[in-house]
Image (cartoon, grey):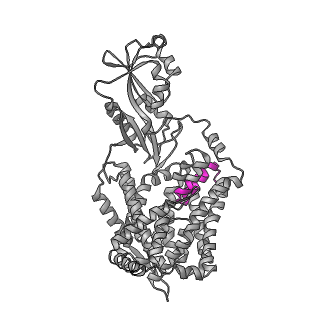
Amino acid sequence: MDEIDKLSHLGEILHAQPVLTLFLILGMGYLIGGIRIGSFSLGPVAGVLFAGLFLGHFDFRMSPGAQAVGFALFIFSVGYQAGPRFFDVLRTDGLKYFLLAIFIASTGFTLAVIAAQLLELAPGTSAGVLSGGLTSSPTLAAAQEAIRSGQISPPEGITADEMIGNVATGYAITYIFGLAGLIAIIKLLPQLLGIDLEKEARALEVSQESATAPEATNVSARIYRVTNAEIIKLPIAQIGRQYWDKASIVKVRRNGKILKPALDDFLQLGDELLVLAPVEFFTSTIAKFGEEIAPETGTAQFTQTAQIVVINKQAVGKSIQELDIARKYGVLLTGISRMRIEVPRTADFNLRKGDILTVAGPHDNVDLLGEELGHVEREIAETDMVTFAFGIAFGVAIGMLAINVGQLSIGLGSAGGLLASGLAIGYLRSVYPVFGRLPDGARWILMEFGLLLFMAGVGLRAGGDIIETFANAGPVLILAGISVTLIPVLTGYYFGRKVLKMHPVLLLGGITGSMTSGASLSIVTKAANSSVPSLGYTGAYAFANVLLTIAGSIILLF
């Protein structure tokens, strides 16, 4: 069997095994997306798109039902993740980020519509240009589903399938520059404006003290016996000022009982110090007090790690300094995440509903802190599948509701319905933590798998005619995509600085959030040598996902 026959036989096998083909695309996409050129990589979404385009050129296709499942998982998960933060930000400090997200989405939307009119792009291509130029997968998903579901009717002379194909090819052609161009402009903009991001980030943090130290992997629990006679000459208040850091927890045990010594008390020889601290604390400080001893019952009872979801109204708005977690509750704060993005643990960091605190400490202490802040989650593995399944079903159902006004059908559509359902359930979960449980790992896999499943279908659909489309309108589409990528960033920065009066570090983070680009956020945080830009990203991200999803359907009306 010669090489041509072997390839033909392989093609027949793949055509007959759609599941095999799908997971080959996903695997190839991750490999392609992981290739780095300097600090740049495509990422899995672009990688899967490329793999799909390649096989799509050879007439491989995906079942519309499989792609619809991916779409539903992705959009619902986007809403669920944004729910707690979305409504909380609307009520608190989110006006600036809301306006920034609206400005950037509106600018990109307007440019895509103008480009479609001036360049006489085929119906549906404007949605592809908008989603590709802004690197917004929710926009693409919403546009294609609006056509597929019949919410948007194609103009005369073109079928719905052809219009969906125009959306896909417009996205595929503009997305790569959208991704690379966005990263490039975000990287170059501070240099062009003469802004030292690292210096600005330090200035922003100048009055902030680090609330805790390192990651949970660097935390350890040990017991030391006091044997240094010099130490017992100092009152505990002086020992605290001279030796303790604000992150570590030290308890004194004397004759088998935990003490609560006053500040003017003294340690005694033979006292045992129960210490929960970063590992550096033991070698730099506690070792001076005496010898480490092996515990009789182990230290596991005061090294439990858990996550606490901020829910309680009285906790929202409080700073880490006000909570004084280490002293009041005897637990270590090892991480804070907002919208699945790690944020800085500084003393004046204010908690918001839906924030997740990772803590280490005794079981009872963690529970006390959990009562103060909201809800404690300990290695939850099970998803509330009843709420998850009915949530998606409800989202699809309300998306089917529409009011006909003349030739126009007005309704949320599948994308809007799923997004609304996800937002509502995510928010209710933050109010009633026993409801709608969807652990972070499960949410990630559902969102990631749903997106990549959908993106594989987009690549396969666009691959069939992308070469012809590129030959006919490729340069024009690229030009349109460049404008949709660059102009919103540049005008958004001006709007943020001059109108919203935002700090440049937070503004750049907000711009990357407004374009839902995690890759660009990593560029900003690296340039700033700080996680502060992530605060701007999370502020705008929840709004941007909702706005850009809605924009995907609306732009098809123009």
Magenta-colored stretch includes residue 418 = no
Q: Quadrant of residue 308?
A: top left
Image location of residue 264, percent across then percent down:
46, 13
Q: Which residue lies furthest to the front in this view?
A: 1
Q: Where is residue 143 shown, x and y percent of the image?
A: 47, 73
Q: Considering only vertical position in the picture, is 139 above or below 228? A: below
| Type of secondary structure dominating the magenta stretch | helix
Is 292 situated left or right of 172 in this image? left
Tell me the residue at 41%/76% (across/down). 403
Q: Is 27 or 187 nearer to us in this picture?
A: 27
> Residue 303: where, in percent of width, then height?
36, 33
Q: Residue at x 49, y 13 (%)?
A: 234
- The residue positioned 51% from the left and 48% from the top of the image is 92
Q: Quadrant of the N terminus?
A: bottom left
Res. 300 visible in picture: yes
Q: Nearer the viewer, residue 156 or 221?
A: 221
Q: Give the range drawn in magenta.
A: 500-521
Residue 354, image x and y in percent?
A: 43, 48
Question: What residue appears at the point 59 percent right and 45 percent down from the top-left corner?
Answer: 529
Is 153 situated above or below 518?
below
Q: In this view, does 389 lie above or below 309?
A: below
Residue 502 in the magenta stretch? The answer is yes
* Res 150 seen here: no
Question: Which residue occupies the extreme bottom position in the image?
Answer: 157
Q: In which quarter of the image is the C terminus?
A: bottom right
